[in-house]
Image (cartoon, rainbow, N blue to C red):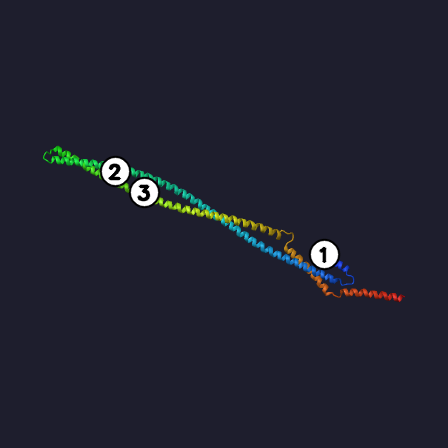
Amino acid sequence: QKSSALVQLASKMASAMRNAGGADPFAKVRGMISDMITKLEDAAGADAAKQAFCVKELGATKEQKEDMADSVQVLGTKSEQAASRAAKLKAEISGLQSELSKITKSQAVLDRLRAKEKSTFEAGKAKAEKGLEGVQTAIKMLKDYYSKGDSTGAASGIIGILEDIESKMTTYLADLTSDEEAAVAEYVSMSKENGVDMATKERDVDYDTKETKMLGKSIAELSSDEDSTQEELEAVTAYREKIKQQCIAKPESFEERKKRREAELAGLKEALEILDSEPSLIQRRVAHRKLRGVEQNAIVAASA
């Protein structure tokens, strides 16, 4: 395929040859060729610089795009993991609060039962002690009365019955006190267990709540970073597409343009070398014209 630059140059050279007159037409041609070589070399240099720019920018934007895409994915994964952990903690907090509510209700029931048992014990004890005191008083009075010599078998039987009642009432009062002490010990033990359980669960709620707040802050930061990185990724992608349109979306590749310019430069340089190697060409043409003029003059003179 012919080069447009060479076609234009050939046209200019032909015009220069026609209009040269007696002057050296190749001097002007040499200048044209030199100018054309300079323009082609400048164009080749500019194209090479653009190609270097394209290679650099496409490579850099490709790396940036891949890095940012990876960052967006990593940030998204971290955000999802944090959100999943926060949801799990919230579920744990809800479960712990439900258990704490149950413990509180259980302790309230336990407190009411203990208060009722204590009230029953105190009432029963007071009654038993009063009855025991009455029996003991009756026994003493009977013993004092019959100790004066008027004791009979019936009196001894009554005192024996009262003493048996006294023994049973003493045993009952001791059992009542023992049962109360056991109930108190059980209440204290269960209350202590509930207290420890509540303290543990409240501490867990406190820790989980703090972690949930930290995760919420982390999720917000990760989301913000992901959004900003995504925006940067979109900007880099748009810039890369613009560079690709400038550098790739051309009908003629850099290699094709390079080969064409190299061919043009080689042809022009060869033409210039030929012109430089034949400096006497124009002189021979001029001498030939002068010789023909002398011969014609001699013929005219001889015929005269």
Quadrant of res 143: top left
Q: Is residue 219 left or right of residue 296?
A: left
Answer with mark 2 or mark 1, whichever residue precedes in sequence: 1
Q: Position of residue 116 (x, y in %)?
A: 29, 37
Query: Which residue is depicted at the point 22% across and 38% down?
Result: 173
> Is residue 2 visible to the viewer in this orientation of the structure?
no
Local crowd at mark 3 within 10 Å, few (<14), some, or many (≥20)? some
Real-space Cα separation, disc 3 to disc 1, in angstroms: 108 Å
Label drawn at residue 122: 2
Residue extending farthest to the top is 154
Secondary-structure class at tag 3: helix
Q: Is residue 85 left or right of residue 157?
A: right
Of tags 2 and 1, the one toward the viewer is 2
Q: Which residue is mark 1?
A: 8
Q: Secondary structure at mark 2?
A: helix
Q: How many marks?
A: 3
Q: Nearer the viewer, residue 260 or 49?
A: 49
Amino acid type, callout 3 = Ser
User: Is 171 positioned to the left or the right of 290 in the image?
Assistant: left
Secondary structure at badge 1 equals helix
Q: Mark 2, mark 3: which one is toward the viewer? A: 2
State whether residue 9 is above or below residue 119. Answer: below
| Residue at mark 3 | 191
Looking at marks 3 and 1 on the same chain, the residue that comes earlier in the sequence is marked by 1
In front: label 3 or label 1: 3
From the top left corner, tell me how far across and down residue 186 is, in percent: 29, 42
Lower position in the chain sequence, tag 2 or tag 3: 2
Residue drawn at 25 percent across, 38 percent down = 122
Which residue corresponds to the image point at 31% horizontal and 39% vertical from the top-left?
Answer: 111
